[in-house]
Image: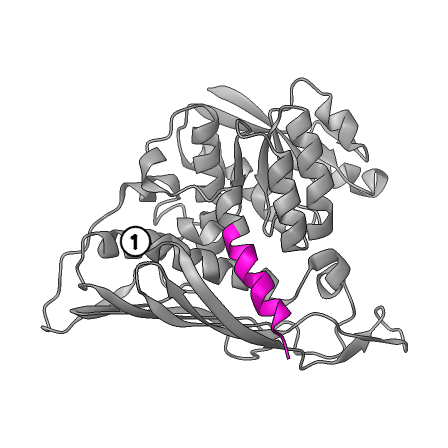
Amino acid sequence: MKPIHFAFTGLGAIAKTHIVALRAMPVIQKSPFVPVLDTLVTRNPDGNREQALAMGFQQVTNSLDEALTNPTVHIVDICTPNAMHFTEGTAAASADKAIYFEKPLTEAYSRTEELMNHIPANTLQQVALVYRYHPAVMKMKAILQEGIIGDVLQCNCSYLRSGYLNAERPVSWRLDDTISGGGAVTDLGIHVIDLIAHLFGELTDVHGETNIFVKERPKAQGSDERVQMTVDDWASFFYTTKSGVRGTGEVSRIAWGSDRFSVQIVGTRGSITCDLEKDITPKVSMLSGATPALPVPSSLQLIPNDKTTMGVFVDSHFGALNHFLHRYIGEDAWANEGLAPTMKDAAHAEMWIDRILRSKV
């Protein structure tokens, strides 16, 4: 097996999800490669060193340059706050490293456009728009490709989370628009818009609105000082695709008791419904009342099976990273399926998010 060495920037929750997925790969699947946790780049190397070494990292540093000049590092996995992605991405590309970006690419669409211009065309890159690797999404894509529900008329998506309803939750980088770029529509909306584009093709129109319902929060845990919020905690939009599909999207970070990622697709012969928070197989309802035989997409090979699943969230990250590593060694059986989410795909979604943010009321 070919060792492929990773440098990570950041050790937050999403970085730990990537790390869990990478560490599990040689346990769950026999592959032609083995991911190696080489270098962790963190602002607090002394505080994180013991845990990082226990995770399997060989080196811990606060210097990205040190990681990039290390000839053993093949891939840089960028898991820092959004506003740091530009500098880290351009530096990694200049060092001729492959790059795996967390989403979004940057904190602003204009910045993303600039980043796109700085990354050479021959740089291997991928963005963690991981719902493409959700088992139910893989199956929905195959169902649509086989035309089982006929011509698609509309699709409505609702991605609801609840953790920010508590007005006493203190400010973090995700609630600072200079670092995150936005709230629910940036954090969750990029997944919704990319899912729509992945299933139905390029979007031609998106318009919507955002709102800030929780107006202020403590500056820090236990602090009496309050800070005015500048990022949305809810957004809704209408969209149209080039293929003629129309529908709505809703995202929220304050939907207490209603956490879900529901997808409802209506075609001329039936419908597909699914909650990506809990379902691994979509429900297909035919107008005729028949129960169709559903296709089994080959891309399911990229994720853990029913006996080795780590839950759909981690499994989807596993599939995305697994695909990226296959692409890295030049053995991509899914190269012609448009599965891998690239910077171009992320930028397409971020363009529409920018439009929604500019129309906020």
Residue 124 position in % (x across, y down):
52, 30
On the question of residue 265 being in view, the answer is no
Dominant secondary structure, magenta: helix
Compared across the picture, whether 117 is left or right of 318 comes to right
Rendered view: 128 above or below 350: above
Q: Quadrant of residue 60?
A: top right
The reply to whether the magenta stretch includes residue 352 is yes
Rendered view: 185 above or below 319: below
Q: Which residues are magenta?
A: 348-361
Task: Write the residue at 60% across / 62% down.
Answer: 354
Q: Quadrant of residue 336?
A: top left
Rendered view: 218 above or below 116: below
Q: Residue furthest right?
A: 224
Residue denoted by label 1:
141
Position of the C terminus by quadrant: bottom right
Task: Write the residue at 74% across / 56% down.
Answer: 179
Task: Write the residue at 23% across / 52% down.
Answer: 145
Q: Nearer the viewer, residue 231 or 217?
A: 231
Residue 13 position in % (x across, y down):
65, 52
On the question of residue 262 being in view, the answer is yes
